[in-house]
Amino acid sequence: MSWDELEAIGQSDVREVAQQRDDLARLVLKVFSTEDGNKLLTWLKDVYVNVPIAVPGTDSSHAYFAEGQRNVVRDIEARIKQARKL
């Protein structure tokens, strides 16, 4: 659950927030289940996940930035997995 979802709970019905989360997961699954979407996800993983986070000689803040990029791809993968369970 994201911060936006947590904040929305106080402003609206919990069921509405859950429905929006499920709808987004279904959308992500729909997009990345296509042949092109699968190619894009593979590219995203190759560029942002399957690479070293910390590279000798770079500023340590690079690792934080790289981890943030990885988290975006992991979020996509988590939403795909979630949608497959719906």
Image (spheres, rainbow, N blue to C red):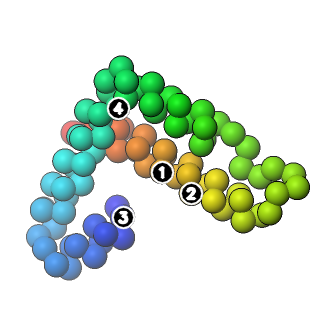
Residue 68 - label: 2
Q: Position of residue 11 (x, y in %)?
A: 16, 78
Query: At 34% from the left edge and 38% from the top edge, which residue is drawn?
Result: 80
Is 39 placed above or below 28 here? above
Name the front one of labels 4 and 3.
Answer: 4
Name the front one of labels 1 and 3.
Answer: 1
> Can residue 9 be seen in this snapshot?
yes
Residue 32 - label: 4
> Can residue 84 be seen in this snapshot?
no
Sequence-wise first label, 3 or 2: 3
Q: Distance between the residues labelled 4 and 1?
A: 14 Å
Sequence-wise first label, 2 or 4: 4
Name the front one of labels 3 and 2.
Answer: 2
Q: Distance between the residues labelled 1 and 3?
A: 12 Å
Q: Do the CB atoms of the residues marked 2 and 4 lie less than 8 Å apart?
A: no
Which residue corresponds to mark 1?
Answer: 72
SS at circle 3: loop
Amino acid type at circle 1 is Val
Q: Distance between the residues labelled 2 and 1?
A: 7 Å
Is 55 placed above or below 18 here? above
Q: Which image quadrant is residue 17 in? A: bottom left
Sequence-wise first label, 1 or 3: 3
Amino acid type at circle 2 is Gly
Q: How far apart are marks 4 and 3 (CA)?
A: 21 Å
SS at circle 2: helix
Residue 2 - label: 3
Direction from residue 7 to residue 48 in the image, left or right: right
Name, please, the residue furthest toward the right.
57
Query: At 63% from the left edge and 59% from the top edge, which residue is drawn?
Result: 65
Q: Do the CB atoms of the residues marked 2 and 1 lie less than 8 Å apart?
A: yes
SS at circle 4: helix
Is 28 placed above or below 35 here? below
